[in-house]
């Protein structure tokens, strides 16, 4: 039933629907539910320590015997520069909100990503079937190591140049991430403003420029988006926001409710949570940080220094300081189990395709 099959053939899956890896939000249950329904479930492992990552992979395998993906952030982004003066300023700024929430002292930034080499070794030892990475430059040896296992490698590009660079490095499948997408912009080869191309403009240009399968990502929420992605030249879709209201994921209830109540105009690309541009639902932190952008620490130190504030806010059931990554399509998210969501999208794909037949 799918107009193009190279993606499903390469990945060994039934339906060309990839549940986006979502560091902090994806769980073994979510990954397995999607893979069991014939899609490709992905675990966002960037912030998961190596030993825990091994446990999670084994848990996924207990829940499904179908292919799944594990995603890491490319090693270039995990180290953070120490900027002591800026750190003091940010710490003082955060202290006012810590006081308001009774959240205790502002913590020191600590490494919260990676270490890539150890995480990656776990993926190799566990022989994961699909590896995906966000950000570049591409870890070329890691790609070769995955290939020697017979595994497939996916990576995010936000413009044509990045897609070509990734293919040259050996990546098998390109995820073309449009402007609409929730979470971090995957831009790595150009200033981030050069990677803000909408999905509709990006996908056909990437598809024309490279010879490997292209997966459309950003703003795809249902069968209408999947049909459109195929029309644009993609061989499948990667969807993150659509799975944020599923009960299997691991996001605070205030975040889930914010997704369900989100309107088309409620998200914005901001660097204030992590130090890197990412699309999130507007909240008090984003508003009040507007005049303090010059104090934001480099990624990932900003993400680390804000960890207690975000957690306390979520524990107090307040969305004010939570980083609620979300795409522009959030209003279309549905609170139903992931497997059901996949089955519904497949049914509707048939109906949408039929409705487009010229009479
Ligand atoms: C909550 C959340 C977390 C994300 N975390 C990751 C991640 O860890 N790794 C990654 O490659 N992409 C991540 N992304 C981006 C997705 O891979 C994808 O580009 C995006 O979800 C597509 O747009 P959509 O959200 O409109 O479906 C994340 C997205 C969201 C919404």
Image (cartoon, helix red, strand yellow):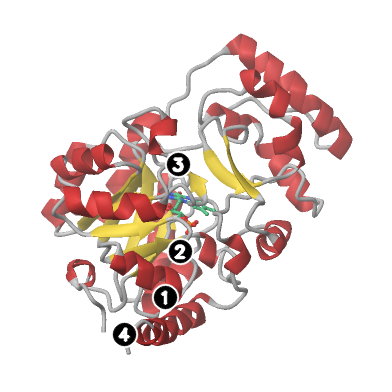
**Is the CB of the residue bearing disc 2 within 8 angstroms of ligand 1?**
yes
Q: Give x and y (percent) for residue 49.
A: 45, 45
Tell me the residue at 20%/59% (across/down).
213
Q: Which corner quadrant holds the N terminus?
A: bottom left
Eyeballing the image, is 46 above or below 329? above
- Helix, strand or loop for disc 4: loop
The mark lying in front, picked from 4 and 1, is: 4
Q: Residue 202: give x, y in percent of width and height.
A: 33, 49
Residue under the image location 14 percent in, 40 percent down = 168
Q: Which residue is mark 4?
A: 358
Q: Residue at x 35, y 59 (%)?
A: 216
Q: Earlier in the sequence, mark 1 or mark 2?
A: 1
Instruction: Locate residue 327: give its quadrant.
Output: bottom right
- Alpha carbon distance from label 4 to label 1: 43 Å
Give how far across and how far down residue 303 sits, in percent. 58, 34
* Callout 1 crowding tier (Cα within 10 Å): few <14, some 14–19, many ≥20: some
Earlier along the polypeptide chain: callout 3 or callout 2?
A: 3
Image disc number at residue 185:
3
**SS of the residue at dot 1?**
helix
Q: CA distance from mark 3 to mark 1?
A: 31 Å
């Amino acid at each position: 039933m799918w107009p193009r099959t190279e993606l499903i053939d390469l990945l060994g899956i039934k339906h060309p629907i990839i549940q986006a890896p979502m560091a902090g939000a994806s769980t073994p249950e979510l990954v397995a539910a999607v893979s069991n329904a014939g899609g490709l479930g992905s675990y966002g492992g960037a912030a998961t320590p190596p030993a825990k990552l091994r446990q999670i992979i084994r848990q996924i395998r207990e829940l499904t015997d179908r292919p799944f993906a594990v995603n890491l952030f490319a090693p270039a982004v995990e180290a953070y520069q120490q900027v002591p003066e800026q750190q003091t300023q940010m710490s003082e700024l955060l202290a006012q909100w810590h006081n308001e929430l009774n959240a205790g002292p502002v913590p020191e930034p600590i490494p919260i990503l990676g270490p890539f080499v150890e995480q990656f070794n776990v993926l190799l030892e566990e022989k994961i079937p699909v590896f995906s990475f966000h950000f570049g430059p591409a870890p070329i040896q890691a790609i070769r190591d995955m290939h020697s296992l017979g595994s497939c490698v996916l990576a995010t590009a936000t413009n044509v140049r990045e897609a070509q660079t990734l293919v040259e490095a050996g990546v098998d499948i390109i995820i073309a991430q449009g402007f609409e997408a929730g979470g971090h912009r995957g831009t790595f080869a150009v200033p981030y403003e050069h990677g803000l191309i909408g999905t509709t403009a990006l996908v056909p240009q990437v598809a024309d420029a490279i010879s490997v399968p292209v997966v459309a990502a950003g703003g795809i929420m249902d069968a209408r988006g999947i049909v459109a992605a195929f029309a644009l030249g993609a061989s499948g879709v990667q969807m993150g926001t659509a799975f944020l209201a599923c009960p299997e994921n691991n996001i605070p209830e205030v975040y889930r409710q914010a997704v369900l109540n989100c309107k088309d105009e409620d998200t914005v690309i901001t660097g204030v949570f992590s130090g890197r541009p990412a699309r999130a639902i507007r909240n008090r932190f984003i508003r009040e940080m507007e005049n303090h952008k010059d104090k934001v620490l480099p990624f990932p130190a900003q993400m680390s220094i804000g960890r207690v504030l975000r957690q306390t806010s979520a524990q107090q059931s307040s969305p004010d300081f939570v980083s609620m990554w979300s795409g522009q399509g959030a209003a279309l998210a549905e609170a139903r189990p992931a497997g059901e969501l996949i089955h519904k999208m497949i049914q509707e794909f048939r109906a949408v395709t039929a409705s487009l037949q010229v009479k």
